[in-house]
Amino acid sequence: MEERVMKDRVMAEPLPRRLQELPRPCARLCLRVRRFIHSLLPEASLSGSVLVAFSGGADSTALAVILHCLGMSPQLAHLDHGLRAESRAEALHAASFAQRLNAPFLTERIVVADLARQENLGLEAAGRLARYRFLERARRETGADWIATGHQLDDLCEDQLMRLIRGTGWPGLGGMPALDGKRRLLRPLLATRRSEIETFLAALGLDRIEDPSNSDARFTRNRIRHELLPIIRRENPAHADAGLDLWRLARLDESYWNGIIEPALAAIRPELLPAEACERPRDALPALHLPRHAFAHLPAAARLRVYMALIRNGAELRGKGQARAETLFRLDECCMNGQGVKYFQLPGQLSLIVCAEGVYLPLEREIIP
C-alpha cells in the first residue's frame, strides 16, 4: 500500500546555498566530499541532477546540504516505512526541509511489515528492498542521473564487520562500494566520519530526525554498532582509518580482478539446458551457461570470481540468490576434475549444474533431484 504525502507549506528560514555562506570548517568538509566524488566519477558525469535518499536523519540531512552547496541541484526522496506512529510527522518534516532547501521533493508511504510478510523477509531486509525500489522509481520519474545515499565511514566499518560475520570473501570484505554504476548509486560521504557530520550539523544549527529503531538490539547492525564496534575501537582508536584503508585496497583488487575475468563473463549466454543435465527430456529449461573453455584455464582465484558473477547474474534475474564459500570450492573441484553431472543447491532458490559443457544456472525453478 502506497500513499502520497502532501508537501508541508510551512515557511522556514532558508538554508545555505553556496560554499561562501558556510563557516570555514563546513566549507572544507564540502570540498573534501567533492574531491571524493570526483575520485569516483569524472566531473561531466555529475552535470545532471542527483536524487538524495532523504530520511531526515543526520547523514541524509548533511548530504542534502553539502550537495546543494556544491551546486549539484539535489532532489529529495523520502520513504515512509509505516512502522512507527511518528512516521507521518517525519514525512512532513522531510517535506519542510526540502522547501527550505528549495529542492524538489517526492515521497511515498509503504507498510514495510506487510512487504516483509509478502516476501518472507525480515524487517531490515524488507525495508532495504522497499527503499531501493522506491528510489529507483523516483529516479526514473524525476530523470535524475544518480541516487545519493548518506552512508558514511562508520556505516562502512559496520558493513565490513557484518560481511566478516557472514563469511564474505575478498574483495567483498572491503565493504559497500561508493559507486554502483549498474544501480546508479553514489555514496558521497563514505570517507566521512559520523562525528564530522554531527559537527557540520551543529555548526549550521540543523536538527534531524532521531529514529529510535537505530537503538533496537533486535537488529544485527545495531548490535554491531553499539556492542561490537566500541570494543574494537578500544583496542584500536584508529579503526575507522583502518577500515577506509581496507576499503581502498579492496576497490583496487576488485578493479584488477574484474579486468582478468571480463572475457569469461562475456562468454555467459542464455541457453536451454543440455539433455545430460536434465532429469527428463521435458525438463529442458532456460539457463545461463558459463562454457568450460571460458574459465578452465584461469587460476583458482579468478575461477571463483567467475562463478560468483554467474550467481549474481542469476540472482538479479530470479530476484534472489547467493553462494557460500564452501559451495564455490566444491563447485570448482567438480569443474576441474570432470566428475560428470553434479547438482548444487544455493541459498535463495538458485541451482547450479556442472557438466562437460560447463556450468549452468537454471532460470525458472529448482531442478535438484
Image: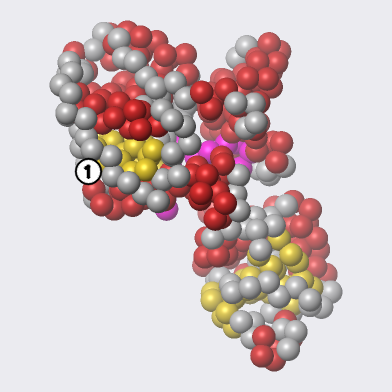
Q: Type of residue at label 1? A: Gly
Q: Nearer the viewer, residue 59 or 293?
A: 59
| Image location of residue 356, percent across then percent down | 74, 79
Quadrant where the C terminus sits is: bottom right
Relative to 75, is 30 above or below? Answer: above
User: Is residue 33 visible in the rendered structure shown here?
Assistant: no
Q: What is the magenta segment's predominant secondary structure?
A: loop
* Residue 4 in view in this figure: yes
Q: Residue furthest bottom?
A: 281
Q: Which residues are magenta?
A: 171-183
Residue visible at 68% across and 20% down? 227
Kind of element beneath mark 1: loop
Q: Position of residue 100 (x, y in %)?
A: 19, 23
Query: Residue 175, how many percent across, how many down?
Result: 57, 36
Q: Which residue is mark 1?
A: 48
Q: Residue at x 49, y 44 (%)?
A: 112
> Where is residue 367 shown, x and y percent of the image?
71, 75
Q: Quadrant of residue 340?
A: bottom right
The structure residue drawn at horizontal position 41% and vertical position 45%, both measured from the top left corner, is 110
Q: Is residue 296 above or below residue 325?
A: below
Locate residue 206 relative to residue 303 in the image: left or right: left
Residue 182's place in the image compared with 47, above or below, is: below
* In front of the other: 141 or 300: 141
Q: Quadrant of residue 199?
A: top left
The residue at the point 74 percent across, 77 percent down is: 355
Pick the residue in front: 69 or 103. 103
